[in-house]
Amino acid sequence: MSQPIKLSYFAWVRERIGRPDETLQPPADVRTVADLIAWLSARGEEYAYAFEKATVIRVAIDRKHVKQDSPIEGAREIAFFPPMTGG
């Protein structure tokens, strides 16, 4: 059984979802970041909109940047944010 995970959203991901963070318990078959994004996208219109271009979303698990094929098992916090631009 999976454990609850704090999900944090930044920049336009947060704006589209309408909240800065939440704690959710994904189903046991959600094993990777990509699985989590797909599961979140199915939760409602605002999530589908936030993750409509999932490949550009950057992800950090417990403050470490990871790829979307990374496992989420044992994660305490997962943060989602758009690509950063230099300036």
Image: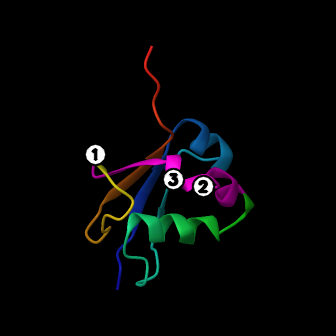
Q: Which residues are magenta?
A: 46-62
* Vertical arrangement, residue 31 with respect to residue 29, above or below: above
Depth order, front residue of 39/4? 39
Which mark is on residue 63? Answer: 1
Q: Residue at x 55, y 55 (%)?
A: 54
Q: Tell whether label 3 touches label 1 (CB within 8 Å).
A: no
Which label sits in the foreground, 3 or 2? 3
Which mark is on residue 51? Answer: 2
What is the count of numbered marks?
3
Residue under numbered circle 3: 55
Figure quadrant of the N terminus: bottom left
Q: Describe residue 43's horizontal placement relative to residue 37 as left or right.
A: right
Quarter of image, res 46: bottom right
Identity, as a three-letter code, of the amino acid under mark 1 = Arg
* Vertical arrangement, residue 39 with respect to residue 67, above or below: below
Q: Residue at x 30, y 60 (%)?
A: 76
Colour pattern of the rendering: rainbow
Q: Describe residue 38's horizontal placement relative to residue 68 as left or right.
A: right
Sequence-wise, the earlier of marks 1 and 2 is 2
C-alpha span from label 3 to label 2: 9 Å
